[in-house]
Image (tube, rainbow, N blue to C red):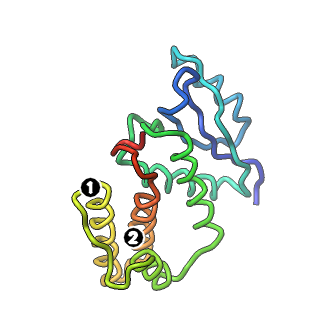
Amino acid sequence: MSAGAKVYAIIEKPHPDGPVKIGMTKGDVETRRRGLQGANWRQLVVWTETELFDEHEARYIEYQVHTWLSEVALNGEWFECTPQYAWHAVECAIYQLRNPLSTNEAFARAWYPSVPSGPKVSSSPVHRSVAAQRSLATKALKEGNDAIVAKHLAKAKLLLSRSPGKTENGR
């Protein structure tokens, strides 16, 4: 296993609540920030970073986070949300990577967190999105596609973890 791959969050200094860039690098994060600075007229700062075991894991985490945050994507690896919200997605992806569940366990935990009869669909866009993700997970489970099941359940869980009072774009 090669060491040194990192996932990082970079923000624009005058805007600490977003947007945020989530990326990965095999090199130094500060060197990566300086490389990005030339294409951005605002001052960029490294918000946080994590050391991972290998490049494969870093790419997996980056992919998962980009997938989960796709609803708030701006362009490329930039997202219109707080760095805390984006980093929560990174932590969820790391946890998922290091603590894999069987498909049935993941389905049961995401579908029935506290309401045995299943989730209620409210009129909020977030809850409608959660219901859609769970529906897609159910369909994938019936088709035996474990990777797609995990993807949709993780996205539903991330959507449910949004703080109350936040708007649709994470602010």
Task: For marks 2 and 1, give the CA distance.
Answer: 25 Å
**Element under label 2?**
helix
Q: Quadrant of the C terminus?
A: top left
Specify the quadrant of the image occupied by residue 25.
top right
Residue receiving disc 1: 124
Image point 35% across, 81% down: which residue? 141
Q: Earlier in the sequence, mark 2 or mark 1?
A: 1
Mark 2 neighbour density, 10 Å: few (under 14) some (14–19) many (20 or more): some
Q: Nearer the viewer, residue 131 or 121?
A: 121
Residue receiving disc 2: 148
Specify the quadrant of the image occupied by residue 138.
bottom left
Image point 76% across, 55% down: which residue? 2
- Under mark 1, the amino acid is Ser
Image point 45% across, 76% down: which residue? 113
Considering only vertical position in the picture, is 163 above or below 107?
A: above
Q: Quadrant of the N terminus?
A: bottom right
In the visual, does 60 lie left or right of 134? right
